[in-house]
Amino acid sequence: MKLSTIILAAFTTLTVAVPLAEPQDTTAELSATASIGGLCIIPKVRREWRTLSKTQKKSFIDAVLCLAKKPKEKGSSIGGARTRWDEFQGIHNEQTPFIHFTGIFVPWHRYFLSVVEDALVKECGYKGGLPYWDWLIDAESGVPFEQWPIFDPVLGFGGNGPYIPDSEVHPDDNPIPFPIPGRTGGGCVSDGPFTFPGFKLSINGTDPHIQREEHCLRRDFSPSLALYDLKRTVWDETIAAPDFHSMWRSLEGEPRVMGPRPNIHHGGHNGVGGELGQMGHTYNSPADPIFYLHHANLDRAFTQWQLKKLPQRWFDVHGNIQAYDFAGANGNITLAYPLNMGSVAKTRKVIEVMNTWGGPLCYTYA
Ligand SMILES: *[C@@H]1O[C@H](CO)[C@@H](O)[C@H](O)[C@H]1NC(C)=O
Ligand SMILES: *[C@@H]1O[C@H](CO)[C@@H](O)[C@H](O)[C@H]1NC(C)=O
């Protein structure tokens, strides 16, 4: 592989799709949000994974396994899905061209997490908020990556897959191979609660980047990439951003990995998923339960940024509609822009998910 190809990465493989028409903001819609904050009385508390008790950890993992065994909803729009877990991966797969490197990256993923959190609670009896994974604690601990507690086979999500030297043979049929430096795995996760066939995945999606038959969860650890990207300086810069646009750009990072600037979003994805693991795959990353803990931590950064200036930051949203069109030549999102969840959940507007403590959302971070 040439060095230039190495700079290309997991997050460059989107197809640019024609965006939806931009809805208009109306004064009525904005004033309707005056009801923000009215209904959330007892917020779910999202806690850092390692602060959960053994019982809480086990009950979270059991709830994930429950969704992964529960048949998909009747009338599900997700092609090839067999289970509820597949449906969640599937909607992310379908929406990928609209929700990455666009202004709705942050609000769409916030809404998505809350939909899955609700399913864990209402359908599978989990009590509590979606846990988050504060990778900075691990990155600063000096403990080797493979031994980070989140990968514990009993009280965590299990570890790496066996090393597959030939990463050209991509199981998800990815048209652009994206070499990740220092990758150490690539095969099916071989310990912990999410090994095959106890935990199996199946969607066919609407694009070619997909495996059609039942398959395993794979991981392809890249410890050097994780340590390059997971830096407190990046977190601090994100939280200190002066406006939504720069906060989002700092959070999501450039459309490549191992560029000149470290990025926390890539660090969690490609540190765990490398090249061959689902976590490293733009479309399919929610196959891995760790996805939700990683993104909860990113949502926590968004929340901390908002809390620095309220109520203004419930209304501050700006960014391109079309992927990679960072200058917004083809249009920008507004607070009325739709967050599409297909058959998985109601379509909502950006404004509805700006406050985590009101409207349809009801959670807080400890
Ligand atoms: C994908 O799944 C849908 C619905 O489950 C099915 O109708 C379709 O034939 C599948 N497509 C492929 C290519 O497997
Ligand atoms: C989108 O916003 C940018 C400013 O960030 C502006 O330059 C651009 O003209 C806007 N696009 C449209 C179509 O209005």
Image (cartoon, rainbow, N blue to C red):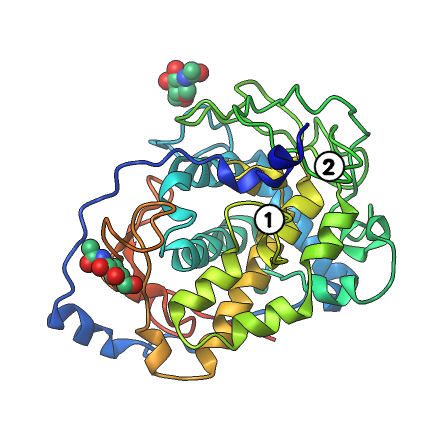
Q: Do the residues labelled 1 and 2 touch (CB within 8 Å)?
A: no
Residue at 36% across / 69% down in the picture? 354
Q: In which quarter of the image is residue 107?
A: bottom left
Three-letter code, disc 1: Phe
Where residue 160 is drawn, which disc sits there?
none
In terms of depth relative to the viewer, which is nearer, 95 or 176? 176
Q: Name the residue under label 1.
A: 291
> Could you say where residue 227 lies in the image, as x and y percent from the top left?
75, 56
View quadrant of ligand 2: bottom left
Three-letter code, disc 2: Asp
Q: Looking at mark 1, is its residue's CB closer than 8 Å to ligand 1?
A: no
Q: Give the CA distance from mark 1 to mark 2.
A: 14 Å
Looking at the image, can residue 42 be seen? no
> Could you say where residue 8 lies in the image, as x and y percent from the top left?
57, 38
Seen in the picture, residue 282 relative to 28 is either above or below; the reply is: above
Q: Looking at mark 2, is its residue's CB closer than 8 Å to ligand 1?
A: no
Q: What element carries label 2?
A: loop
> Could you say where residue 361 lies in the image, as x and y percent from the top left?
40, 66
Compare marks 1 and 2 and give the one earlier in the sequence: 2
Residue at 43% across / 47% down in the picture? 100
Where residue 220 is drawn, which disc sits there?
2
Mark 1 crowdedness (10 Å alpha carbons): few <14, some 14-19, many ≥20: many
Q: Quadrant of residue 19?
A: top left
Figure quadrant of the N terminus = top right
User: Quick check: 361 left or right of 256?
Assistant: left
Residue at 65% across / 44% down in the picture? 270
Figure quadrant of the C terminus = bottom right
